[in-house]
Image: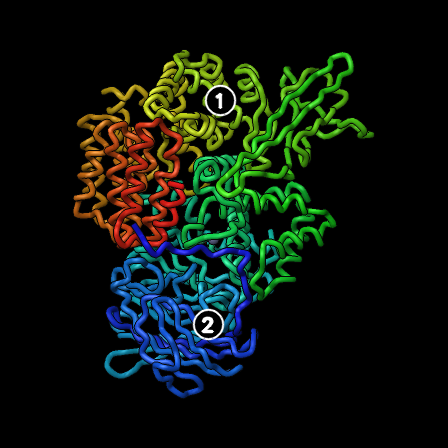
């Protein structure tokens, strides 16, 4: 057990820094084992006279420190493991610090590290302090000049933020480059890359007519696999000009792809660094989902240039200010590039899967947390995805035009600043004149509100009274909750299938067919008049709030909405609710709901009208989504019932699935566009049902699908079907895939992942065997996530009743903690739902968590998540 319990940092303790640092000059002498960093910083006191200079530093060897050119003697400063304190400093001075670091030993992948012969940095949130001593906090903004010196043969490419000022050759086979970034930025946006890389080049002319060079650096030979990212970047740059009036500001924008990275990508000013998983794509190696993710992440990081870089966060409690907003921006971009309805469905699905789960468990926290031990643990779905939902609600409440006015105001008012969530909301109040006091609760209160609707139709008066009630359960540290300000978008559908006008009592003209009600009290009744027939309420259209919408509806009502709701999102939602209800009933012994099974008929008949949407209509709620609806989760029963419902649908519509599959089986050349991807998604959805029996015939079809595939999407669909089966066909296909892609790490990750997510009874054993595969590597986060991360998302097998899944993951996270604590702590999230299972499983999971907490030398990252889960 840790004795030095790490202490928490609280928002209420925020204090402005005592010094400004207008300029920083960094001089890097690169060497994998001993890199020397000479930092020169101009310091100006802004706080209390006489306050000491206290700088962050971690895993550094201090070589020398000097003030205004005078080296300090050891008694003039104190050095602690994570701080350098100089008690006596003037009000204005130049500080020179020389440190030495060992990038090759940096398995945490935070600060400066090497991977496959490449130097690269990751400084968000607190990695810069692993490079030199500094005010490693987001409210200290400096102009950086970076000089890099390195061996020319090994590291021909030398990059940092901003514009290239100078480069040249030096003696001993060395060379150098000098970069200057004129935009003041916090240290977390600093970046450096050095290595032998290929480059894909392009350029774009911005809205004011400036030409910007675009460069994507990749391993030699991978240049063609960066063309989709380049294309996405150009579209994103244009979109941000049109949708938000944001123009790019430097003369060059660069992206570098690296193979060892703790998460997706990083928005360093002018030099984004990407996990190659979200950058490289070709039809032979990437699925349609990969393409969509690349488009989204390239846009996300680019959009940060304004929402994050030009305007950054005052402190890490404001993280959602940049992350929630930037997610909202990238979601809008992807929706415009693809289908709005399908994008919304995917986003809501992801939100429910991760964020609702987080909100319902021991790690629940508000969009603006009040305290943390390790900020790395707070790059969560709540900060990102719920943060984006909060912005979506603001837009819904104020309308599109006022939204743009507010964001324009935000960008002009706070450009160059480190801002707060409060600054952001204030811009909405100032731009629209609305009072958002109650709305601010969305930032402060954790938990997913429930909105329960009940209606009363008065046939004689032709009125419909709709009562909406909101409730929010306690979450850790927040026993009492206040009522929220919730936009509820809705429509009413008649039994005939027509949309009914929504005229509220007191309106002087017939109302529209859709409107947004503002729920602000614990309970409110809205009376609609002129309602010609008893309506079915279509509530929470397009998911107008990150809430759980509840309304008493029969299976017949749901299947009616599934077919007739004019809002396609809610047609999908009705289908999901119907399927979930059916599966829950089947777990109690009911037969598959014949109404739901029949309702798939019309979906198939209309499938070709919007294929991507139809594919979503055909995809049943995931096992973990069904678990969310249970008080005590029974993973085996959920799996069995879900499979039984799929089989019932498959049996009832065999002919239609066959016909659809055949019709979509042409061999047009691959194109990653949304329409082509939708077609593949629909065909692969049909394959899921056509192979539902998991028997010999199913294996033959899946194997044929795999063998005849001309792109990775179809190969993976075939392989995913085979992964469910124990058959020679499956073994053959997996062996073939392995041999064909053994040299391609990203594709091999799929091979690991598909086996880890299999429902087969021997999955735990197979995962253990795969951990001994020569390609498995605890030091590579992508590989660990592909195998262990995927396995812990396999509800059926991770939660195996004998506890074998828990031990497997428990052992890995404890071992990984010593290698890469950030990734390990994130992976420990697998145990987050432990209290929602039966007592036997709870005890097994608890034992893993307790064993973890007792591990000697446990990181504070892991300590924080595990102790909170056990609290
Ligand atoms: N801002 C980074 C995330 C950094 C995570 C640090 N633990 C990527 C992004 O959200 O765009
Ligand atoms: Zn981001």
Q: Quadrant of ligand 1?
A: bottom left
Name the residue carrying label 2: 163
Does dot 2 land on a helix, a strand or a loop?
Answer: strand
Question: Where is residue 235 shown, x and y percent of the image?
Answer: 50, 52
Q: Nearer the viewer, residue 40 or 292?
A: 40
Which of the two discs, 1 and 2, labels the residue nearer the N terminus? 2
Does dot 1 land on a helix, a strand or a loop?
Answer: helix
Q: Nearer the viewer, residue 563 or 75?
A: 75
The colour style of the image is rainbow
Q: Is residue 508 left or right of residue 87?
A: right
Q: Is residue 667 visible?
A: yes
The image quarter containing residue 83 is bottom left
Specify the quadrant that holds the C terminus. Answer: top left
Q: Residues within 10 Å of mark 2 (few under 14, many from 20)?
A: some
Q: Nearer the viewer, residue 154 or 321?
A: 321
Disc 1 and disc 2 in contact, CB within 8 angstroms: no
Task: Mark 2 and ligand 1: say if the CB distance to the nearest ligand atom is below 8 Å.
Answer: no
Q: Is residue 787 visible?
A: no
Query: Does 16 sit above or below residue 825?
Result: below
Q: Is residue 493 left or right of residue 71?
A: right
Q: Nearer the viewer, residue 850 or 542?
A: 850
Q: Residue lying farthest right?
A: 508
Q: Residue lying farthest bottom?
A: 70
Give the residue at x 30% y 66%.
Answer: 195
Circle count: 2
Name the residue carrying label 1: 603
Give the residue at x 27% y 68%.
Answer: 102
Q: Residues within 10 Å of mark 1 (few under 14, many from 20)?
A: some
Query: Does 302 sit above or below residue 523?
Result: below
Give the residue at x 45% y 64%.
Answer: 189
């Amino acid at each position: 057990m840790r004795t030095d319990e790490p202490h928490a940092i609280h928002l209420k303790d925020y204090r402005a820094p005592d010094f400004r640092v207008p300029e920083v000059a960094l001089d890097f002498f690169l060497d994998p084992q001993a890199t020397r960093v000479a930092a020169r910083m101009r310091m100006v006191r802004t706080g209390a006279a006489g306050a000491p200079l206290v700088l962050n530093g971690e895993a550094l060897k201090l070589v020398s420190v000097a003030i205004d050119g005078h080296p300090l003697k050891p008694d003039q400063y104190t050095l602690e493991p994570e701080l350098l304190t100089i008690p006596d400093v003037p009000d204005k001075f130049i500080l020179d610090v020389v440190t030495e670091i060992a990038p090759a030993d940096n398995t945490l992948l935070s600060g400066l590290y090497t991977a496959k012969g490449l130097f690269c940095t990751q400084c968000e949130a607190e990695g810069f302090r692993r490079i030199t001593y500094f005010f490693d906090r987001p409210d200290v903004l400096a102009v950086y000049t970076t000089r890099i010196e390195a061996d020319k043969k090994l590291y021909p490419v030398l990059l940092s933020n901003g514009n290239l000022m100078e480069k040249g050759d030096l003696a001993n086979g060395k060379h150098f480059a000098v970069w200057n970034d004129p935009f003041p930025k916090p240290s977390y946006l600093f970046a450096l890359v050095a290595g032998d890389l290929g480059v894909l080049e392009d350029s774009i002319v911005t809205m004011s007519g400036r030409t910007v060079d675009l460069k994507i650096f990749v391993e030699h030979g991978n240049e063609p696999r960066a063309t989709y990212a380049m294309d996405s970047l150009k579209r994103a740059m244009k979109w941000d000009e049109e949708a938000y009036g944001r123009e790019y500001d430097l003369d060059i924008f660069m992206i570098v792809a690296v193979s060892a990275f703790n998460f997706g990508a990083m928005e360093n000013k002018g030099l984004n660094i990407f996990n190659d998983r979200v950058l490289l794509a070709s039809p032979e190696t990437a699925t349609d989902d990969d393409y969509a993710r690349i488009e989204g992440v390239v846009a996300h990081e680019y959009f940060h240039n304004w929402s994050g870089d030009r305007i950054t966060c005052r402190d890490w409690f404001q993280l959602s200010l940049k992350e929630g907003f930037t997610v909202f921006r990238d979601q809008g971009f992807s929706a415009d590039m693809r289908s709005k309805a399908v994008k919304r469905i995917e986003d809501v699905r992801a939100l429910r899967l991760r964020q609702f789960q987080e909100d319902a468990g021991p790690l629940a926290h508000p969009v603006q947390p009040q305290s943390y031990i390790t900020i790395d643990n707070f790059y969560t779905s709540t900060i990102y995805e719920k943060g984006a939902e909060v912005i979506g609600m603001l837009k819904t409440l104020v309308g599109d035009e006022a939204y743009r006015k507010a964001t324009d105001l935000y960008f002009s008012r706070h450009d160059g600043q480190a801002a707060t969530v409060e600054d952001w909301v204030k811009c909405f109040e100032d731009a629209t004149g609305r009072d958002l006091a109650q709305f601010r609760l969305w930032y402060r209160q954790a938990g997913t509100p429930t909105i329960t609707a009940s209606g009363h139709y008065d046939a004689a008066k032709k009125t419909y009274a709709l009562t909406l009630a909101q409730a929010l359960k306690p979450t850790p540290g927040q026993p009492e909750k206040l009522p929220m300000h919730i936009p509820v978008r809705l429509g009413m559908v008649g039994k005939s299938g027509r949309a009914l006008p929504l005229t509220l009592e007191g309106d002087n003209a017939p109302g529209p067919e859709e409107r947004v009600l503002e729920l602000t009290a614990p309970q409110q009744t809205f009376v609609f008049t002129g309602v010609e027939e008893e309506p079915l309420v279509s509530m929470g259209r397009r998911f107008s709030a990150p809430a759980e919408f509840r309304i008493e509806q029969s299976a017949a009502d749901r299947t009616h909405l599934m077919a007739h709701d004019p809002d396609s999102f809610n047609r999908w939602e009705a289908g999901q609710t119907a399927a979930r209800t059916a599966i829950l009933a089947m777990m109690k012994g009911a037969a598959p709901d014949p109404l739901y099974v029949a309702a798939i008929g019309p979906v198939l008949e209309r499938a070709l009208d919007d294929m991507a949407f139809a594919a979503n209509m055909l995809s049943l709620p995931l096992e973990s989504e069904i678990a969310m609806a249970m008080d005590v989760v029974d993973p085996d029963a959920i799996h069995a019932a879900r499979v039984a419902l799929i089989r019932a649908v498959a049996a009832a519509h065999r002919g239609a699935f066959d016909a659809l599959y055949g019709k979509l089986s042409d061999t047009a050349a691959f194109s990653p566009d949304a329409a082509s991807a939708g077609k593949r998604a629909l065909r692969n959805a049909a394959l899921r049902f056509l192979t539902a029996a998991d028997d010999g015939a199913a294996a033959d079809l899946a194997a044929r699908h795999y063998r005849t595939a001309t792109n990775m999407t179809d190969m993976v669909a075939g392989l995913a079907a085979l992964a469910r089966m124990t058959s020679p066909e499956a073994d053959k296909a997996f062996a073939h895939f392995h041999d064909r892609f053994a040299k391609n790490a990203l594709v091999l990750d799929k091979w690991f992942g598909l086996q880890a997510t299999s429902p087969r009874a021997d999955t735990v054993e197979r995962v253990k065997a795969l951990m001994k595969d020569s390609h498995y590597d605890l030091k590579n986060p992508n590989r660990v996530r592909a195998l262990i991360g995927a396995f812990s998302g396999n509800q059926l097998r991770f939660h195996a009743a004998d506890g074998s899944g828990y031990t497997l993951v428990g052992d890995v996270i404890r071992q990984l903690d010593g290698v890469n604590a950030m990734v390990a702590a994130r992976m420990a999230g697998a145990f987050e739902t432990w209290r929602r299972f039966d007592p036997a499983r709870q005890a097994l999971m608890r034992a893993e968590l307790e064993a973890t907490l007792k591990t000697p030398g446990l990181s504070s990252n892991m300590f924080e998540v595990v102790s909170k889960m056990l609290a």
